[in-house]
Image (cartoon, helix red, strand yellow):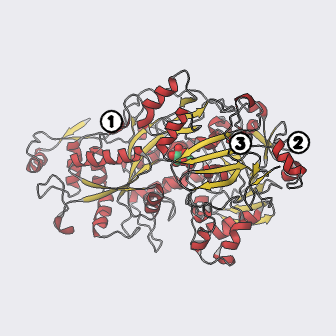
Amino acid sequence: MFKHKSSAFAALLLGVSATAVSAQVLEPTTPPQAPNFDAQGEPIFVKRSDIYDYRALDSYNEPDFVQAFVDSGALPPVEERLPNEPLVYNVANMPDGAGEYGDVMRHVIGGRPEGWNFWGGQSQGWGGIDIGLTECLTRTGPLFTVEPSDLEPMPNLAKSWEWSDDGMTLTVHLIEGAKWSDGDPFDTEDIAFYWDDVIMDSELTPLMGASQATYNGATLDIVDDYTFTMSFDTAFPEAVLYAMAYGNFCPGPSHVLKPEHPKYGGESYESFRNAFPPETLGFPVMGAWAVVEYRSDDIVVLRRNPYYWKVDSEGNQLPYLNEMHYRLSTWADRDVQAVAGTGDFSNLEQAENYVESLRRAAEADSPARLAFGPRTIGYSALPNLSANGWGDPDDRAQAIRDLNRDINFRKAISYALDRQRLGESLVKGPFTTIYPGGIYAGTSFYDADSTVYYPYSVETAKHFLEEAGLVDTDGNGFVNHPADVLGGADVQMTLLAQSDYQTDKNLAEGFVAIMEEAGLKVTLNLLPGKDYDDARYAGRYDWYVYRNTAEMITVVQQTTQLAPVGPTTALQHRANDAGEMDLLPWEQELVDVVNAFIASRDPAERVELMKRYQKLHTENLYSVGLTAYPGALIINKRFANIPAGAPIFMYNWAEDNIMRERVYVPTDAQQDYELHPNTLPSSDGPVTAG
Ligand code: GLA
């Protein structure tokens, strides 16, 4: 497993470290087996069509208070508000059956809404608020419960789709007759605006970064009010169906957005972006609840959308819950409040909180249940691989970029990392596991034999620093650049991390301390969530700590994010202002593998391609894995219809996975938490019946 250094090299090393007598350079290996950790609760696997379909029912029901709006003439009758064929949740697939109306889900979030313009790039504060407000063409959250043989995105606003015989064109059919929460029709006008005026407008990037490349370079044409086509250069790029789910193809209300867009008379892109500040009540949504109250640093309250286009198979218009709260606090407080019962929901994902949360949840009078899922929370450190100007580096930063592109430097960092210690610094016990990077262990495309792991060894790290030309020439404990770079100054690398999460901060601090042991000086750049995102999208960093997302778990999602296949698809390597990419040869190979994966419909070939991907990614350290561990869903015991085995993160976050629109509280367990009883959202502000 390890090879001894040549004596000549050992002598060289002796010059730097007087104590190193017989230095050893460790060879890469495969990652150690993760400690055993059983997920609690297994999903019940079904076909997608067992969960819901689209059809007309004989009659529909709604809460009495909404009926009162109809009776007073303030709202059209429910059957006129619903599409001819609404999306119908099959009651037989619901864990506890058809629900009852009422009550609230009290979320706590650590983010803050900048405003409601997702399409202008504004964050709504995360924690499920944007997931609930926007609806997308397809849906992935519930796929954790779908049989592998039926695995394809669920329809949502796109009711169906078909490929042309040659696979070059996808025809998409929207649900017909669905309406925005203010009653305006949802149709291809909204699609055209999203495509032509957001995606194809280089001045705008929607919140989660969608671009034409996200959709495999598609061109989009409108056919009629409810039909459009997407055309491609390659046959059957099925990944596009995943790209049409949450995060990307979630169209906005063109009837209110368009007049603010500079192309249609809006003042500027800046004014477009800021046209819907958080104080805007009743911003039209396709989601189950719309905003009726906003109090800065306090709370956002949402009430049921009377035009929501989903029902249960007994004809009850959804959602069952009348109200949603998003308490504006911290992510750590979300855990504390959920276990205490003053909040209703948390994705337990900050490992530092596990012991205390588990202890409280185990008590007989605990108001919440807590269930662990698979190890799908992972963190990596990502190098900035652009050396041609992305993010405008100064001389110091440029010198780091040049080092980042040297495999010796990346290896030094990976060898220097004591991942065991890093994981245990968050929480002791069988939770965290050594994560070399790339696709997560335990997921369907993972292959241990294709995973290259550079094991912890400070000596080996120092060896590779030296191979990268970095030696501590001034004896201050930190390696210096060669004399011809920055005058031989100490190497000073910065690590960007977000300050909103304790875990991110702890991992970043751990990284800095561990690198110091190998002689590498790292300084932290801790920024709040939004500033952190802005900095990484703009390439203003040397390295950053990143909580991985779906592509490392499912591969079939955000597939274009797996490699720099387009100028803005990759996390750690984007084009400079002139649109030029300076890919390293192995990055080009990564791109080719990812493109081949997207183009392939042969399952066996896809498996082989992902083995190749994993090998290229981990051997070349496209990212450096830090740790991976399981998360737990904490949810108040009064809620019904929470599906078994719902992971806090897989195809999407638990806020989508549990299908909140069909979650309910049985009447006898309902609490008095509604802040705006008998109220509906409207674009003129909330309206209360009676
Ligand atoms: C944040 C939280 C996650 C989840 C997502 C939903 O990232 O940390 O647990 O709630 O928001 O977007």
Q: Is residue 643 above or below residue 222?
A: above
- The residue type indicated by label 3 comes to Glu
Q: Position of residue 218 (x, y in %)?
A: 64, 63
Number of the label disc, if any, that sits on residue 300: none
Q: Is mark 1 within 8 Å of ligand 1?
A: no
- The residue type indicated by label 2 comes to Leu
Residue 158 relative to residue 382: left or right: right
Q: Can residue 135 be seen in the rendering of this structure?
A: no
Query: Which residue is painted at 68% across and 34% down in the image?
Result: 671
Distance CA(mark 2)–CA(mark 3):
19 Å
Residue 309 relative to residue 451: left or right: right
- Numbered disc in front, either 1 or 3: 3
Distance CA(mark 1)–CA(mark 3):
41 Å
Q: Can residue 320 be seen in the rendering of this structure?
A: yes
Query: Which of the 4 image quarters holds residue 28?
Result: top left
- Which residue corresponds to mark 3? 661
